[in-house]
Image: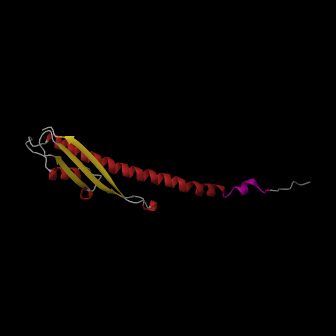
């Protein structure tokens, strides 16, 4: 007597299983991968802007009115805008405030803003403005 196959050949029933599993796992994998890329891009822009702003404030701290080459609003804006090769200088918006002036004991505050936009167009994320601020007391 011959055995009856009710379910068919097990090897044949799993032929398309790998393709279905791949299709189901590809979407979440790509979403996580692109999310990591976007977060890395945002973090890089934020870190580059922070470093530029801190460098500008450190320069202003030691180049007060008693210095041989005192820091000016224009010189600090230029320094922050050109402070990082990761940023486009013309896109960096910089505000420098001396309170009350650039004499020793006064404070200097630098606020910089840079536009960030998604680098992966498939995600269609909205753009954002990255802002960095640094404040310190002028020593010289």
In the rendered image, the quadrant that contains the C terminus is top left
Residue 102 shows up from this direction? yes
What are the residue bounds of the magenta stretch?
A: 7-16
In the rendered image, the quadrant that contains the N terminus is bottom right
Q: Which quadrant of the structure image shows residue 117?
A: bottom left
Residue at screen point 41% across, 53% down: 38
Residue 105 place in picture, x, y as percent: 15, 39
Horizontal side, residue 41 vs residue 132: left or right: right
View extreme (front): residue: 100
Q: Which quadrant of the structure image shows residue 65?
A: top left
Between 100 and 130, the one nearer to me in the picture: 100
Q: Is residue 116 magenta?
A: no
Residue 88 place in picture, x, y as percent: 27, 56
Residue 55 place in picture, x, y as percent: 22, 44
Q: Is residue 13 magenta?
A: yes
How is the structure coloured here?
secondary structure
View extreme (right): residue: 1
Horizontal side, residue 60 vs residue 86: left or right: left
How would you classify the magenta stretch by its main secondary structure?
Answer: loop
Horizontal side, residue 31 vs residue 128: left or right: right
Between 13 and 87, the one nearer to me in the picture: 87
Between 133 and 120, the one nearer to me in the picture: 133
Numbered circles on residues, count: 0
Between 31 and 99, the one nearer to me in the picture: 99
Residue 76 place in picture, x, y as percent: 18, 49
Residue 82 shows up from this direction? no
Residue at screen point 55% across, 55% down: 26
Residue at screen point 59% across, 58% down: 23
Does residue 91 sit above or below 97 in this rendering?
below
């Amino acid at each position: 007597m011959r055995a009856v196959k009710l379910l068919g050949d097990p090897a044949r029933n799993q032929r398309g299983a790998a393709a279905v599993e791949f299709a189901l796992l590809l979407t979440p994998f790509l979403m996580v991968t692109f999310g990591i890329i976007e977060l890395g891009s945002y973090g890089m822009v934020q870190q580059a802007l922070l470093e530029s702003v801190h460098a500008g404030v450190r320069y202003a701290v030691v180049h007060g009115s008693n210095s041989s080459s005192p820091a000016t609003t224009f010189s600090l804006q230029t320094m922050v805008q050109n402070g990082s090769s990761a940023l486009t200088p013309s896109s960096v918006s910089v505000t420098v405030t001396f309170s009350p002036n650039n004499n020793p004991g006064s404070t200097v505050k630098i606020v910089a803003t840079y536009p960030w936009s998604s680098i992966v167009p498939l995600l269609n994320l909205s753009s954002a403005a990255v802002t960095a601020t640094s404040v310190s007391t002028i020593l010289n």
